[in-house]
Image (tube, rainbow, N blue to C red):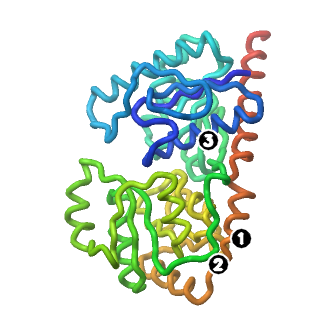
Amino acid sequence: MKIALIAPPFIAVPPADYGGTELFVAQLAEGLQKTGIDVVVYTNGESSVKVERRHIYERSQWPIKQDHHAWLKELHHTAWAVQDAAGNCDLVHLQSAQGLACSRFVDAPTVCTLHGAHDAKLSEFYARYPETHYVCISEFQRGQETMPHLRTIYHGIDLSQYHLNDAKQPYLSFIGRIAPIKGAHLAIEVAKRAGIPLKIAGDIQPMYRDYFEAKIRPHLDSSFIEYIGLADLNAKNELLGNSMAMLFPIRWNEPFGLVMVEAMACGTPVLALRGGSVPEIVRDGISGYVCRSVSQLAKAVSNLQTNPMNPRDLRQYVQENFSLERMVAAYTALYKDAWAEREARKVA
């Protein structure tokens, strides 16, 4: 079986720094390839994922300008990719909605992973393609959808890329888009209440520049509250691995939150506000703490100072629940089911 993984054209696969969907595609592609399944990734020309790659756009484009030109670019890329995959692959795995409109013109079975927050209009659109097999990335997300072919597959990561660090340093970390819904300003408040320094890493998109200037920059002092910019894999390992805890004070219903798993893989507990998938990813008291307020987050920091979690237990928790092998096995089973159903329709 040969699988076409179609990623958006804007960010390289894997990403140099920011790009949760692109990291997922890279790890899934290489994981599938290791099990003997042929994979081709449709991406941009800057990608380096170690499988067959195809592209029509040479360069990444980030941050994406939120206008119709970007939408048209993704539609053009995705339509070309679906058409090309139809002649070369046995199954098409999409990461965005645009490809669904093209799927009606090809005979290959289609899988679509839902990476974003619930949108009623998108769900209405998905329902128009009932033969597509949809993947939710958390049970929380699945509970918001009603398509007939729907299953949950948690993201998994290649643990060999993440370094376990037993010796933690007395600082907190935050990695994520510098946007109000991600709660960087709340992370600052937690650090100040707890009296523990904070290191922030993340992308500042143009639309959130005002937020950064008003809510983040005034607190930066290069010692207690520090912004270190974007973080590639090496920087993530250092920042997360050395940190006593990673703060995840979200203000929205996060569909998954891959960085939580990355932190735990480095042996670092996650202190998060309850929202979306958080209670599924963080096992309260085992791999971190799920809190309801900034004051509870600050109290959780104090708890870790007196009763630190064993980094090796956190690593084992990821191995058991969010490993690459587990994710690859789940997608392989899905691909086989989708293929078998398509063959059954042919006979019927």
Q: Is residue 220 visible to the viewer in this orientation of the structure? A: yes
Q: Tags 1 and 2 in contact by the CB under 8 Å rule?
A: yes
**Secondary structure beneath disc 1?**
helix
Q: Position of residue 227 (x, y in %)?
A: 33, 65
The local crowd at label 3, few if under 14, some if 14 to 19, many if 20 or more residues have their Cα within 10 Å, is many
Which comes sooner in the sequence, label 1 or label 3? 3
Mark 1 burial class by Cα count in 10 Å: few <14, some 14-19, many 20+: some
Q: Is residue 333 shown to the viewer in this render?
A: no
Q: Is residue 121 left or right of residue 29?
A: left
What count of labels does the image hold?
3
Gap between marks 1 and 2 measured at Cα:
8 Å
**Residue picked out by circle 3:** 27
Looking at the rendered structure, the kind of residue marked 2 is Met
Q: Pick whichever, 125 or 155, lies toward us.
A: 155
Residue at 43%, 41% (x, y): give it.
Answer: 119
Residue 102 on image: x %, y %: 49, 17
* CA distance for labels 3 and 2: 28 Å
Mark 2 residue element: loop
Residue 172: image x %, image y %? 46, 74
Residue in front for this viewpoint, 100 or 74: 74
| Residue 321, image quadrant | bottom right
Tag 1: amino acid: Asp
The amino acid pointed to by label 3 is Gln
The numbered mark at residue 313 is 1
- Percent position of residue 292, x then y: 48, 74
Write down the residue under mark 2. 309
